[in-house]
């Protein structure tokens, strides 16, 4: 029974494909993989916008949206109809293009942003046997299409012919290039351990239980825990979320690279940002949190896809919490943090991962606990030293008026 | 020679042609990106996954951004764009291009490689590529790494010197 529910979407797809003639089957199969991605994740975007506004409202001691429900009835759905109303509103808005803008590039930029991000979902395993394309080099594909979004940001900023747009684009590109490096290098440890670049195989490598209850996820190893924290920091910066939202800092440069966009094109940028956030969180889940696997042995009756989305909602909640509580960084702090702290830490983490891998056969005193302490110390000691050195570069804050 | 190949080839060639002939430098750079993406598609069609993805990662993700930044940081970008693409040297250039093409095509047509029976397409998985790179070809890889590090240090030194002069 549990297996049937777990595989319900896979069986459904096979059943639907069976209705079509042999020649059409590959096309139909591909379409049936694409349509769920195109419907589920934008829907999740809608839900996330409402959740975010409600969450931020609670943090700021107000209600947030709680009115819009099903039209013509009194059912309010706690305000979860809000995103439909917002979507309709934005669809009917006028599309303003500045006169001095480069029309073609201005039009292409939002498309160039959303398409690569949607492509990235092709390699994410959202459940058991539920990966649209099982590529041999899946993680490489993910980063390759992810890097294409930087160009879209530049196109948007440059074509708008507006100083705020260009400033935002410059900031965004500088930030994305700087944080892409720690993002990729921190995921290298997982690839080293699993010995594969294919995401389903990385998930499979994290199956099983330690002592019958602790899942064998990468995050429960010293290198995995460090890698996970570094990866998530870089991922937040990569998706331009608070505290790394300098490219669209509305108090400084209006809305950054999409200042000159309105109506549905603006919505596309918004969508692209959230979809990118979900995709990179999905990658974090796949690499470090065991993908679609259940966290405890007696919870395996809950289907695998539900676990994936539960973990994704955990990430969304975390992002909302961060957005409600952290202030924005300054550009120089941002760059220093990436190059002087994150990148060295990821490189040290690779060494720790290598020690963890080879110490399987060493006679480390204390067995597993000894290995744990050894590898954790390999990361923690440089962390403390780096942290001290990094802190010294930050000038002490001078309080001029407050005592 | 399938439809996909022709589409990708057309995209690559159109991008390359645009990169040469468009007026504004940023348009040229973007059109060059189109050409590079088409090339990545051709690599993927040949079954070279790693090369294809690396092409996108390196050229579209990094080199294109570098090109675009270089154009933006040189202030006379718009002035260069105003000069006409058709000049007096155009005919001479065409003549040279035709001559080079004819000589290359003649050399290729006469080469013995065309008569060789087609070998089965090689299967280069990412794993094979990795083990080869880390085993057999470790020395070239290390030398390249050293070269790139030296380049980077050189760039940093030049940048530091400029700041001190100010």
Image (tube, rainbow, N blue to C red):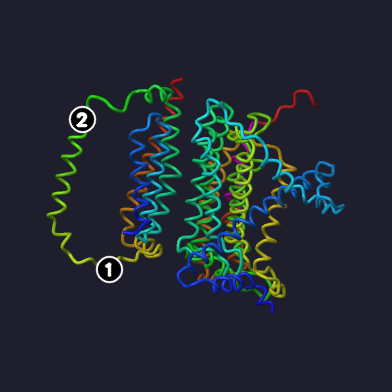
Residue located farthest toward the right when viewing the structure as drawn:
A74
- Neighbourhood count class around disc 2 (C-alpha, 10 Å): few under 14, some 14–19, many 20 upward: few
What predominant SS class does the magenta segment belong to?
helix
Q: Nearer the viewer, residue A217 or B56?
A: B56
Residue at the spot of label 1: B120
Q: Please state if A363 lies on the left or on the right of B4 as rendered.
A: right
Establish if A365 lies above or below B38. below
Establish if A133 lies above or below A101. below
Q: Inspect the magenta stretch and tell me whether residue B98 lies in it.
A: no
Q: Please state if A286 lies on the left or on the right of B146 as rendered.
A: right
At a point 16% along the width and 44% down the height, the residue shown is B102
State the mark number for residue A380. Answer: none
State the mark number for residue B91. Answer: 2
Q: Chain of mark 1?
A: B
Residue located farthest toward the left when viewing the structure as drawn:
B110
- Residue span colored magenta: A380-395
Q: Nearer the viewer, residue B73 or A52?
A: A52
Q: Chain of mark 2?
A: B
At a point 70% along the width and 30% down the height, the residue shown is A397
Q: Please state if B102 lies on the left or on the right of A261 as rendered.
A: left
Q: Inspect the magenta stretch and tell me whether residue A388 lies in it.
A: yes
Q: Is residue B90 something one can see in this rendering? A: yes
**Residue B10 x/y as whole percent:** 35, 48
């Amino acid at each position: 029974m549990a297996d049937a529910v777990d595989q319900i979407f896979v069986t459904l797809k096979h059943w639907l494909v069976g209705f079509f003639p042999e020649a059409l089957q590959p096309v139909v199969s591909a379409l049936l993989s694409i349509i769920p991605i195109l419907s589920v994740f934008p829907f999740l975007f809608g839900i996330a916008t409402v959740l975010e506004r409600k969450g931020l409202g609670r943090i700021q001691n107000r209600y947030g949206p709680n009115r819009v429900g099903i039209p013509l009835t009194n059912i309010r759905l706690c305000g979860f109809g809000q995103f439909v109303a917002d979507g309709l509103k934005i669809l009917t808005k006028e599309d303003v293009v500045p006169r001095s803008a480069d029309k073609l590039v201005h039009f292409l930029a939002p498309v160039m942003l959303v398409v690569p991000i949607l492509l990235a979902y092709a390699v994410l395993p959202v459940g058991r046997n539920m990966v649209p394309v099982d590529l041999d080099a899946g993680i490489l594909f993910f980063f390759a299409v992810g890097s294409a979004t930087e160009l879209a940001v530049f196109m948007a900023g440059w074509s708008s012919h507006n100083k705020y747009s260009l400033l935002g684009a410059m900031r965004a590109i500088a930030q994305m290039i700087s944080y892409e490096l720690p993002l990729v290098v921190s995921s290298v440890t997982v690839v080293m351990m699993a010995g594969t670049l294919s995401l389903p195989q990385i998930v499979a490598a994290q199956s099983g239980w330690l002592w019958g209850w602790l899942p064998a996820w990468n995050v429960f190893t010293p290198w995995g825990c460090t890698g996970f924290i570094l990866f998530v920091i870089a991922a937040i910066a990569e998706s331009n979320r608070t505290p790394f939202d300098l490219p669209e800092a509305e108090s400084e440069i209006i809305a950054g690279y999409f200042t000159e966009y309105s109506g549905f094109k603006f919505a596309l940028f918004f969508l692209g940002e959230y979809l990118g956030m979900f995709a990179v969180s999905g990658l974090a889940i796949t690499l470090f949190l065991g993908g679609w696997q259940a966290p405890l042995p007696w919870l395996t009756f809950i289907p695998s896809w539900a676990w994936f989305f539960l973990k994704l909602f955990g990430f969304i909640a975390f992002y909302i919490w961060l957005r409600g509580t952290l202030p924005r960084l300054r550009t120089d702090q941002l760059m220093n943090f990436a190059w002087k702290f994150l990148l060295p830490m990821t490189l040290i983490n690779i060494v720790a991962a290598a020690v963890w891998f080879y110490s399987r056969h060493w006679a480390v005193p204390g067995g597993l606990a000894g290995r744990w302490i050894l590898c954790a110390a390999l990361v923690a000691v440089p962390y403390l030293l780096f942290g001290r050195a990094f802190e010294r570069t930050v000038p002490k804050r001078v309080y001029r008026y407050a005592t | 020679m399938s439809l996909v190949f022709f589409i990708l080839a057309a995209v690559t060639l159109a991008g390359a042609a645009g990169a040469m002939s468009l007026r504004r430098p940023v348009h040229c750079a973007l059109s060059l990106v189109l050409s590079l993406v088409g090339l990545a598609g051709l690599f993927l069609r040949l079954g070279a996954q790693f090369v294809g993805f690396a092409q996108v990662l390196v050229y579209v993700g990094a080199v294109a951004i570098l090109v675009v930044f270089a154009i933006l940081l040189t202030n006379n970008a718009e002035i260069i764009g105003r000069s006409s693409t058709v000049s007096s040297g155009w005919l001479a250039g065409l003549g040279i291009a035709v001559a080079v093409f004819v000589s290359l095509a003649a050399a290729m047509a006469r080469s013995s490689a065309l008569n060789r029976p087609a070998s089965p397409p090689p299967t280069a998985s990412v794993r094979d590529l990795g083990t080869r790179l880390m085993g057999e070809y470790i020395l070239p890889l290390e030398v390249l790494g050293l070269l790139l590090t030296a380049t980077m240090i050189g760039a940093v030194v030049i940048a530091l010197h400029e700041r001190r002069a100010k």
